[in-house]
Image: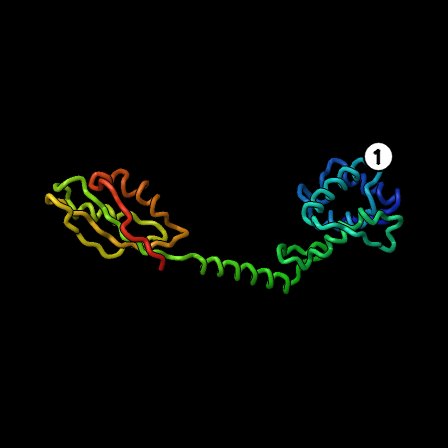
Amino acid sequence: MAVTFADLHTADGLKALEQHLAGKTYLSGDVISKDDIKVFAAVPSKPGAEFPNVARWYDTVTAVVATRFPGKATGVNLPGAGAASTAAAAPAAEAAKAVDDDDDDLDLFGDETEEDKKAAEERVATKASSKKKESGKSSVLLDVKPWDDETDMKKLEEAVRSVQMEGLTWGASKLVPVGYGIKKLQVMMTIVDDLVSVDSLIEERLTEEPINEYVQSCDIVAFNKI
């Protein structure tokens, strides 16, 4: 149920607010809301010691508003607010301007309209789309070396390709003679840069159990952006 506060520039008006804030940090819950901003704007200045609950609440809201609106206040006049302190009223006036702030879709002084919601959704979709476009890909050529000439290279390749993760695609491969009857596996892979770290892939997957039964070491031969 909505609570009404009137004449908050008078002692009688502040008395009702004082009673409502007993045992509370904010007007309508455990976090600051539009209700606090609306009422804050109507209180011309910090109340005196006779209203300790309102004074504490006023300081709390002032701290939140100050961090959100760091610009220097020049002061405004609010007709009907009594002997308002322009310096104290200015942060609340700046809060009213936040309705058009692109960094926050919250309408501080009214319900969010369908147009507001649609505009917010479009901004989110645009940002998400931009992020996806920024995520590049790379082509990587790996040298995978066995322990010795007795290592089963077919099983070695199967073990390497068994590593599957989002953003990793294995490509063509071939066996390249190294010497003394030993061959190494050269294998191509395509990675999404934001999802796959080649160093982590080598250190945490390809040279760890159980794959290190076949793989002695891995080296990056070529790394090219796509």
Residue at left offset 34%, top offset 49%: 165
Total number of numbered discs in the rendering = 1
Residue beneath disc 1: 49
Q: How is the image coloured?
A: rainbow
How many C-alpha atoms fall within 10 Å of the one at disc 1: few (<14), some, or many (≥20)?
few
Res 151 → quadrant: top left
Q: Nearer the viewer, residue 67 or 177?
A: 177
Give the amino acid at mark 1: Ala
| Up/down of 123 relative to 207, above or below | below
Q: Secondary structure at mark 1?
A: loop
Q: Is residue 57 left or right of residue 125?
A: right
Q: Nearer the viewer, residue 119 or 220?
A: 220
Residue at left offset 79%, top offset 38%: 55
Residue at left offset 52%, top offset 59%: 127
Q: Is residue 85 left or right of residue 168?
A: right
Q: Position of residue 121 (x, y in %)?
A: 57, 61
Instruction: Point out the image quarter for the C terminus.
Output: bottom left
Q: Position of residue 149 (x, y in %)?
A: 12, 42
Q: Is residue 139 left or right of residue 12?
A: left
Res 150 → quadrant: top left
Residue at left offset 84%, top offset 34%: 49
- Which residue occupies the extreme left position in the image? 181
Q: Position of residue 114 (x, y in %)?
A: 63, 63
